[in-house]
Every structure is written in C-alpha cells, then in structure tokens.
Image (cartoon, helix red, strand yellow):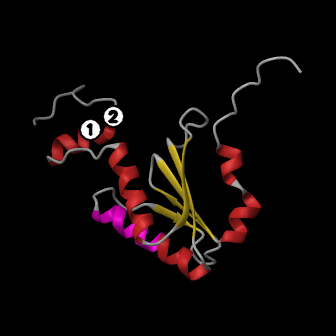
Amino acid sequence: MPFTEGAFSANPFADVAAFSGDATPSPRSLLDTILASLDDAKAEEVVDIDVAAKTPIADHMVICTGRSSRHVGAIADHLVKDLKDAGFGTAAIEGQPACDWVLIDAGSIIVHVFRPEVREFYHLEKMWAPDPAPATGRR
C-alpha cells in the first residue's frame, strides 16, 4: 500500500493493520480472551460491566477476585501473558508489588483483580453498575 497524503483513516489501529497485513482484533475478541484467561487462572466472582455509556476511559470493566495476594498476582501475570500471546500487545499493569488490588489496562477494557477483603471494601460493582430503572407508580 503506497503512501498517499490523507490516505489514513481516523482509526490509527486500522492503519497499522493495513500496513502489517494483520486484521485488527475486535473488542469482542479482547473481552473473550480476558474472560477465558480469568477462567483458566481460576479467578472467582468474575463480573463484566459495560461502562461505555458512563465513561470515555473504557467500554468494559471486568472485576474478579483471587483467593490470596499470591493468587491475585498469578491471575494478573496469566492475563498479561495471554493478552500478549493473543496479539493484543502489552497491557499496562498497576498494583503488582502488593497484589491486594491489581489493575490491568487492556485499552478498551480495564480489569480489576482483588483480594476478597479489598473487593468488599471498595465495592466497584456498586459504583459502576448500570443505573436502576426509575420507580414508577405512586407511593
């Protein structure tokens, strides 16, 4: 594909894929890869929340629990490796030294891996859950 001024699309990932010959992985395949990796790593209480209407930082937020700090770290390591192996690149990771709460930024999906006590304390599901339907009827 020869270079032509103005030939690039608004999506920078599409341009990279056009030049590399690779298809751009779909957001659904990213979510499927994340959920499969968490299942393989024996993550518990996995919750996927669609946050696209609430924030521009991500389309989905996945929250899960590890049984201990060591398990939380292993889940995070396993996920980062699986994402790289699947062609999604290297995800950004925060919180790994303590492994109480590890955040993996996979672009359009943010994954939170908690120890049980920490997850209960922060209760992100409540903060990011879809808004309840307005009450109808009289009181």
SS assignment at label 1 = helix
Percent across and percent down for residue 101 are 63, 68
Percent across and percent down for residue 13 are 30, 42
Q: Residue at left 35%, top 66%? A: 82
Q: Residues within 10 Å of mark 2 (few under 14, many from 20)?
A: few
> Magenta residues?
76-85
Q: Which residue is outermost to the top?
A: 138
Quadrant of the snapshot with the N terminus: top left
Q: Nearer the viewer, residue 120 or 139?
A: 139
Relative to 77, does residue 29 appear above or below in the rendering?
A: above
Query: Is 58 within the magenta?
Result: no
Q: Report the residue marked by disc 1.
A: 14
Q: Kindly identify the amino acid type of the residue bearing the numbered disc 1.
A: Ala
Q: Residue at left 61%, top 75%? A: 99
Q: Report the residue marked by disc 2.
A: 11
Q: Residues within 10 Å of mark 1 (few under 14, many from 20)?
A: some
